Image (tube, grey):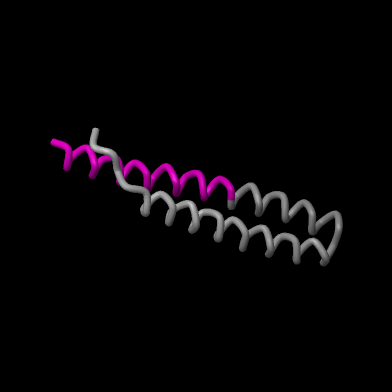
């Protein structure tokens, strides 16, 4: 039974983190679109840096989550 709980926890974790990451990407794209239309080309640099930062942030969070030992429930 614990195997089944662990498997369900992994699947739910994948979908939740994907939805959160997708939402963050969409928010960055919307903010970037607005910034580029109002501030011009220099805003593209900020936009690219934000996308790269969110990728690093979520990859690091996933690595920390996977390296943390699972407590038996």
At 75% from the left edge and 66% from the top edge, which residue is drawn?
45
What is the x, y in percent for residue 23? 55, 45
- Nearest the eye: 15 or 5: 5
- Nearest the eye: 10 or 37: 10
In this rendering, the answer to whether 73 lies above or below 65 is above
- Nearest the eye: 31 or 71: 71
Work out which quarter of the rendered image holds the C terminus and state it: top left
Most extreme residue toward the right is 39
In this rendering, the answer to whether 13 lies above or below 52 is above
Residue 41 is left or right of residue 24, and the answer is right
Stretch in magenta: 1-24
Residue 70, by quadrant, is: top left
What is the x, y in percent for residue 62? 43, 53
What is the x, y in percent for residue 22? 52, 49
Residue 25 is left or right of residue 40, and the answer is left
Most extreme residue toward the left is 1
Residue 25 is left or right of residue 46, and the answer is left
At 43% from the left edge and 56% from the top edge, which residue is drawn?
63
Q: Is residue 10 magenta?
A: yes
Q: Is residue 4 magenta?
A: yes
At 22% from the left edge and 37% from the top edge, which residue is drawn?
5
- Most prominent secondary structure in the magenta stretch? helix
In this rendering, the answer to whether 45 lies above or below 1 is below
């Amino acid at each position: 039974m614990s195997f089944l709980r662990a498997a369900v926890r992994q699947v739910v974790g994948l979908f939740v983190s994907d939805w959160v990451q997708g939402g963050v990407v969409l928010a960055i794209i919307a903010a970037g679109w607005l910034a580029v239309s109002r501030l011009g080309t220099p805003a593209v640099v900020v936009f690219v840096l934000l996308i790269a930062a969110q990728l690093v942030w979520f990859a690091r969070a996933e690595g920390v989550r996977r390296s943390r030992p699972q407590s038996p429930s």
